[in-house]
Image: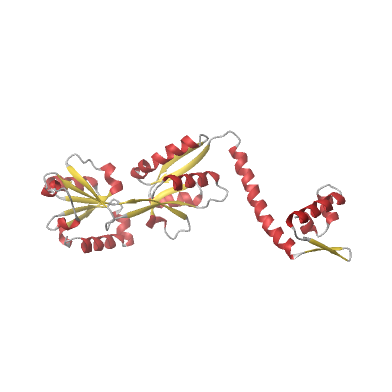
Amino acid sequence: MSVYEEGSITSAAKKHFISQVAMSQQIQSLEEELGVKLFLRQKKKLHQTSAAHYFYYEIKNILSLYDALLIDLKNYSNGNKMVLRIGVNYYSLYEWLKNYSDKFEESYHDINISFEFYPSNELISQLDKGFIDIILIWDKYASNLGFITKPAFISHCTVLIPFNNPLSNLKSFSLDLLKGQRIVMLVEELPYFRRTGHLEEVLSNFYDSTPIKNGDIIVTDNINQALFLSSEENLIIITYEDKLYKIPQKNMKSIIMDHSFMDSNFVFAYKSLENNMVVKLFMNFIEENNHF
């Protein structure tokens, strides 16, 4: 690189405090190894070949990555615990991810995983500023923001039927059986759904997929209200699978409906894998162990 930049073996040798002969021998050895000529001497002047131009810029990129790798490895070998900061907005996401994070820490004893809880918009801001390394979030929040995303899991539609409702005694269940039933749809992200128009999309799909009519459904983001209506008025609750941890189910039967109108995709989002060894290790670990 120095010979290329200086345009002279003599100048490059002086820059590195070695003899001109030693520098010439290194260039000759490199050319023999590559099988191409890098420099041509014409009228006592050194000229770079097209191979030298190509090789120089490729090596420059490689050495830049190498320097960043050395910094990472230096931090890695200092004996300090490295911390991977993961952001989530719901405890259910933390519960799902904890199984993987525990196994990851067992495999990499010098890496600690720190979980941070924020609302969705704040998670995105924290990731963008570099205060969080990875976030686990609903895919519609992370779309079109320039982050790298990888699938995490699907949260399916869940039907909760009170035990005093005759439908709870059936061995098999389909959404067609909801005809004539009054429904509570529990959507904790209701303000966001309404603001983005996603609620209209979900309801439209719901009416198309079931015999339920508009007047038979109550939409709420309040769990206590949903539970009260379910117990007092024998209403069926429909919500997302990842919300089940919040809902006591001793008086109702829960049924997860695969591939239904309310399926919701969650993704890992991060800024870059370059120069971030810990994020790269964790995402590789997830990819190998998560059968999405």
- Specify how the rendered protein is coloured: secondary structure
Q: Residue 77: x and y, percent?
A: 60, 36
In this rendering, does residue 132 appear at all? no
Q: Is residue 152 left or right of residue 228?
A: right
Q: Is residue 78 left or right of residue 148?
A: right
Q: Nearer the viewer, residue 223 or 257?
A: 257
Q: Is residue 155 left or right of residue 150?
A: left
User: What's the residue at 34%, 42% (across, down)?
Assistant: 91
Residue 50, placed above or below residue 120: below
User: What's the residue at 84%, 53% (across, down)?
Assistant: 24
Q: Residue 42: x and y, percent?
A: 86, 66
Q: Quadrant of the N terminus?
A: bottom right
Residue that sits furthest to the right in the current view:
43
In this rendering, does residue 166 appear at all? yes
Q: Residue 85: x and y, percent?
A: 47, 43
Q: Is residue 256 left or right of residue 29?
A: left
Q: Nearer the viewer, residue 13 or 144?
A: 13
Q: Residue 135: x and y, percent?
A: 43, 48
Residue 3, placed above or below residue 114: below
User: What's the residue at 73%, 62% (across, down)?
Assistant: 51
**Image mark count:** 0
